[in-house]
Amino acid sequence: MADSKTLDHRAEYQSRLEARTAWQHRCQRRAQVIANLRLLLFGIGVGVAWFSFGTESIDGLWLFPPAAGFFALVWAHDREIRSEARAGRAILFYERGLSGFDDRWRPGAEEETLTVDGEEFLPDDHPCARDLDLLGEGSLFVRLCVARTRDGQRMLADWLLQPAPAAVIRSRQRAVAELAERLDLREEFAIVSDWVREHVQPEALSRWGEAGAVPPAALYRGMALVLSMLTLTSLAGWLFGAASVLPFAMSGLLQSLFAIVFRAKVQSTLRSVDLPVRQLGVLARLLACVETQRFEASELVSLQERLLDGGQVPSERIAVLLRWAELLEARQNQFFAPLGALMLWTTQLSFALEVWRARSGPQISGWIREVAQLEALCSLAGYAYENPDQPFPEIVEGAGEIHAEGLAHPLLPRNGRVANDLSLGRDLRLLVVSGSNMSGKSTLLRSVGVNLALAYAGAPVCATRLRVSPLVVAASIRVDDSLLDGTSRFYAEIKRLRQIVELAEESRRALFLIDEMLHGTNSHDRGIGANAVIRGLVERGALGLVTTHDLVLTRVTDDLDGAGANVHFQDHLHEGQMSFDYRMRPGVVEKSNALALMRSVGLEV
């Protein structure tokens, strides 16, 4: 059963979902009314035009009121459509949150997902990601990710794959805890992030900003301004009879020569600036969400300070660029074009755009990176808000250790989780887990590994309490043969074991999770090989859990001088039906129901 705080948080999501749904319906109704009025005004305008120009019975000025009303309604209709789209994005945000509360976060076959599964970010040689379902279909990444941009998704994936230093983890925890309660900010950030995902290409935008733009020297910019002023002044003098046409002709000639010299550069600027300007306009809306906040967590304060590098917030910098771009559009106006030519309008504005690009362009990749970090933090914050009963782990320095109370798998349904305690550290470094299939052995390994991925990312964990030091996690749980590569399962497993041993040698702070160790070979070789590998890992300072069906392997703890212990899971067979309680107990499993189960299905054994 969910606790009262979880129910309160779910009720808040539900209330906001209903409010946003009602808002969307209001927008739809208003948009329909406006569309009908617009059609009515159009009909009135046609009638007025007939009487004005067809029969000439009324003055043509009567066309202005319906025309003005029509264009006002076009603007109002567009506003309602945008509001409806915004409400729709908010609805998706809260529907996804509720799916997390209700354990419906796995997308169905026909269900459209809001995010990728992270498979593209998974390196082939990662020591535990595939074994623990950190990324990929139905993974921890899918459960957590609300990031819309590819950079935000990549950053979250990196956090799950690479343990952070203890100080960084603690800093993230404070940021996640603060963002979890900032529901308005997370909603707004998710809404605007959708627009960024649809309209911004971060890689191309960063390349444009870092392309090494060299703005025209101040001398040339000054010359352009002076020439345009001379041309306008001499034109005014000629028109008002204060001077002959010669000064105007001379200044016009000089201005034309100046424009020809810089024409290639100006055209290059104009060709490259249009798309980045539009994309930066969308990005500015997302950056504004962060700039206006007052944060307390040091991680969030530092993020804001990095955005303020240079003394001006990014959205204000981008607003300057947008103003230059809007002024540049005036050259398309046929009435303004002649005056613009006299003012070197296009040349001067292209110079201004290049100056902006040289000063602020290199900052764009940093802005995108900070947005990605906030997206990753919001993903963890959403999980924290949807699981208020889950605590942040205590991250400690020093020798490798993990002490867990009430540890369960975070991806299992709330009502189906069975929690267990375990403790590994300086004295006890190994647990050998015995028991039958489906009794909970592999789930225990995954519960430990997935919770450590959450812990090292900066998120809460599915436990009553967890105290852990930074460890490099390596696993051999899902190891398969490969017909394409000509690799047997046993060979694939021993290659993975070699990787685990090498990591233990490099880090001296490793946690190994090995399921059914060496079960692809005979019992004699398995016993010798497993004993040697496990003993070597423990001697290198690693902690670990190993599961087995083979009770011979449980004797490996006899050679570890108290550094290893046996635990087991039980099964119960009643009238041919196997049942499990998934509770971990001390010692070696004392019974096996395999033969009885085989007989129950009709096998003669």
Image (cartoon, helix red, strand yellow):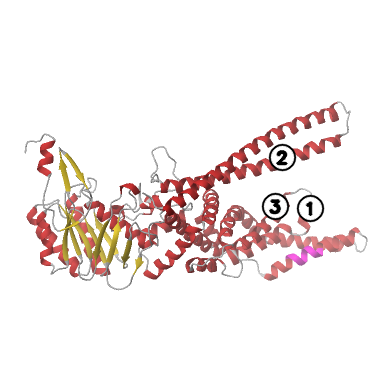
Q: Kindly identify which numbered label has been placed on residue 329.
A: 3
Region of the chain picked out in magenta, as a range: 224-230
Left or right of 490 on screen, residue 121 = right
The residue that mark 1 highlights is 338
Q: Quadrant of residue 231?
A: bottom right
Q: CA distance from mark 3 to mark 1?
A: 14 Å
Q: Secondary structure at mark 2?
A: helix
**Is 359 covered by the magenta stretch?**
no
The residue that mark 2 highlights is 73
Label whose residue precedes the other's in the sequence (2 or 1): 2
Instruction: Kindly tell me whether residue 206 is visible in this rendering.
Output: yes
Residue under the image location 68 percent in, 58 percent down = 323
Q: Kindly identify which numbered label has been placed on residue 50.
A: none
Which quadrant of the rendered structure holds the C terminus?
Answer: top left
| Mark 2 or 1, closer to the camera | 2
In front of the other: 224 or 495: 495
Q: Secondary structure at mark 3?
A: helix
Label whose residue precedes the other's in the sequence (3 or 1): 3
Instruction: Kindly tell me whether residue 126 is visible in this rendering.
Output: no
| Mark 3 or 1, closer to the camera | 3
Q: For the residue marked with disc 3, what is the amino acid?
A: Glu
User: Residue 577, position in %: x, y?
Assistant: 18, 39
| Mark 2 or 3, closer to the camera | 2
Q: CA distance from mark 2 to mark 3?
A: 25 Å
User: Residue 244, position in %: x, y?
Assistant: 90, 62
Q: How many marks?
A: 3
Q: Secondary structure at mark 1?
A: helix
Q: Main secondary structure of the magenta part?
A: helix
User: Residue 86, position in %: x, y?
Assistant: 57, 46
Few, some or many C-alpha atoms within 10 Å of disc 2 (few <14, some 14-19, many ≥20)? many
In front of the other: 212 or 248: 212
